[in-house]
Image (cartoon, grey):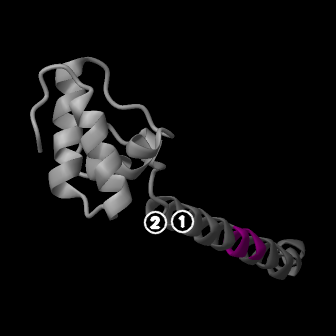
Amino acid sequence: MIGCLARLPFAMKIDKRLLEQFRWTLRSAALVAIAAAATSAPDSAIRWDAKNAYLKCDGAIDGTIAWPSGPQATCVAMLMCANERALSAERHQRLIEQIRRVPGCGEP
């Protein structure tokens, strides 16, 4: 019995160390989750039918992001960009030129 009591403080220290490691791991996991949630997806990962699709407009107009496939989907996306995104005069002009090249797509 005395032997068991003599080992008790050592066992409590181990438990405290494990508890501290668990807390550290939990804090680290929470920080990683917060960082992941705060990091926005790259514009290329956003779908054209998403609420924030307007974020793709600059890249699509510049040619770094592809417009949706098919003339109708492309036209819808381009007209959305013309109406929803504040564009520079130069970028707006390039978008108008691109819209005119899409068959059946009217003026914005």
Q: Is residue 20 magenta?
A: yes
Label 1 sits on residue: 35
Principal SS element in the magenta part? helix
C-beta proximity under 8 Å, tags 2 and 1: yes
Amino acid on which disc 2 is placed: Ala
Figure check: 91 above or below 68? below
| Residue under the point 23% across and 25% down | 102
How far across and how far down the image is residue 22, in percent? 66, 67
Label 2 sits on residue: 38
Q: Quadrant of the C terminus?
A: top left
How packed is label 2: few (under 14 Cα within 10 Å), some, or many (20 or more)?
few
How far across and how far down the image is residue 29, in percent? 59, 62
Q: As rendered, which of 78 and 48 lies closer to the eye?
A: 78
* Quadrant housing residue 46: top left
Amino acid on which disc 1 is placed: Ala
How packed is label 1: few (under 14 Cα within 10 Å), some, or many (20 or more)?
few
| Residue under the point 88% across and 80% down | 6
| Residue under the point 36% across and 54% down | 91
Mark yes or no: residue 48 visible: no
The magenta-colored residue range is 17-21
